[in-house]
Image (cartoon, helix red, strand yellow):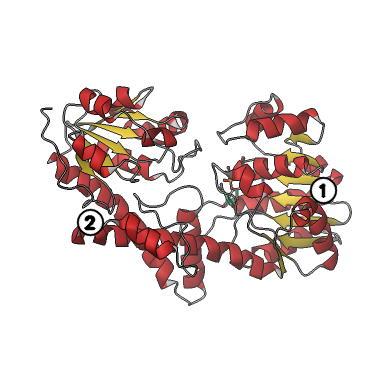
Amino acid sequence: MNIAIIGTGYVGLVSGACFADFGHSVVCVDSDASRIARLTAGEIPFYEPGLGELVERNTAAGRLTFTTDTARAVRESLVIFLAVGTPEGADGAADLSQIASAAAAIARSVDGYRIIVTKSTVPVGTGQWIGDQIRLLAGRPVDVDLVSNPEFLREGAAIGDFMRPDRVVIGTSSERAAAAMREVYRPLYLIETPIVVTDLPTAEMIKCASNAFLAVKISFMNEIANLCDAVGVDVHGVAKGMGLDKRIGSKFLHPGPGYGGSCFPKDTRALAALGAANGVRQQIVESAIEVNERQRQVVLDKIGAALGSVRSRTIAVLGLAFKPNTSDVREAPAVHICRSLAGAGATLRVFDPVAAGEAAHALADVRRSIEYVRDPYEAAVDADAVVIMTEWNEFRSLDLERLRGAMRTPILFDTRNVIDPKQARQTGFEYLCTGRQSVGAGDRVAVGS
Ligand code: NAD
């Protein structure tokens, strides 16, 4: 099967490499010539475990190529995936300009039957609109079928998620397109992956509703965690007890500084905007958005309360990526916290195993207040507080004595709850966390700082 992927970002590159690994012939297109030049030279533009090897293996086998030439890719492929960005627009609704320009490029070059598949996350009705646009802009009869095949992969675990998904959703009214999509995903049929075949708008709504539901779950648990702190309960015990109920499930019950990344923030706002535009307010989703924004303020308030004032204080921030195992800092809580602390007059010493480059770009406006260092202990030197913002595995096994020894004041704020509270307190830290404030609260050992 000849496949084109338009948009070679996180989703496009992972999908392209995995489809090539399934045995298909895949051409990945991007309008960013420097990105294509880097990929052609064997360089992966972002950090994703296992992706480099997968790309290398499939380019070497001749199944995976890269180009900026959309017209050629459209002419040579039967199935054309759209994996371009759908960022937040001015009013919260999805900005579909990248989708529109990809549709226009397809319209200019389509010369026979093609299956156009939307992998990008889009509002309900977009697939229909893409088909209308292609037919309109082509100015001649064109034979295209439209499919929605939303992507559910998680950055940091993207290859495993793509190769062994919980389900594949295929939305189309065309039998012919559905049959071709089954062929595209044949290896997943063989391992009995549930495949949901439905109509196009239902598939689009499945993706929007799934992301919104997960965001709601996170915000719900963050509110419960804040309440746990107020009433002296350990939120981890609560999450465990709740998660064993199959109707609830144990995933996404981990509290923290709020969700971030390139999906949940914009996708929840897009769903709220879609609800408002249709006169059906999505109040639960709107509340989840509000709680998420407030959770960042909760972090800032706790730091402020522990330090008195952050002005002229040195604060070490460990973790900048929005989650571990990725270099992505889009809407990362850490970036928001760093900008706020720097804006309030703090000096920051920050460390992330892979995301420092992308964070430096995102935080260019406050760069004078931020020093990027090579490890957590260097970050802690003369710090008045250490704040863990991303749950990288290496932070779970920090040498707490060494960390404390480097600091000016032993305040440790573990926003992700990766450290054992009792151990932190026994090491002499004033330990702050999210929903576990009561654990080992009597264990603080007075150690001179
Ligand atoms: P991204 O910004 O990393 O990549 C988009 C790419 O498309 C960029 O490289 C850009 O240069 C390219 N592009 C834009 N317009 C183009 C055009 N007309 N022709 C060719 N290339 C073009 O975005 P992403 O994170 O991969 O997300 C893509 C879509 O998938 C979004 O709708 C997103 O919501 C959705 N999604 C993302 C994830 C994730 O974890 N990142 C997961 C599931 C779904």
| Quadrant location of the C terminus in the rendered image | top left
Q: Nearer the viewer, residue 276 or 356?
A: 356
Q: Nearer the viewer, residue 108 or 342?
A: 342
Q: CA distance from mark 2 to mark 1?
A: 60 Å
Mark 2 in CB contact with mark 1 (< 8 angstroms): no
Q: Quadrant of residue 422?
A: top left
Residue 125's spot in the image, x, y percent?
64, 67
Q: Is 391 on the left or on the right of 153, as rendered?
A: left
Check disc 1: other Cα within 10 Å, few if <14, some if 14-19, many if 20+.
some
Q: Residue at x 28, y 29 (%)?
A: 369
Q: Is residue 289 visible?
A: no
Task: Residue type at mark 2: give it.
Answer: Asp
Residue 258's spot in the image, x, y percent?
37, 52
Residue 50's spot in the image, x, y percent?
62, 34
Residue 70's label in the rendered image is none
Q: Nearer the viewer, residue 61 or 116?
A: 61
Q: Is 122 on the left or on the right of 91, as rendered?
A: right
Q: Which residue is mark 1?
A: 109
Q: Which residue is mark 2?
A: 229
Task: Residue type at mark 1: give it.
Answer: Ser
* Looking at the image, residue 427 lies above or below residue 188: above
Q: Residue at x 78, y 28 (%)?
A: 60
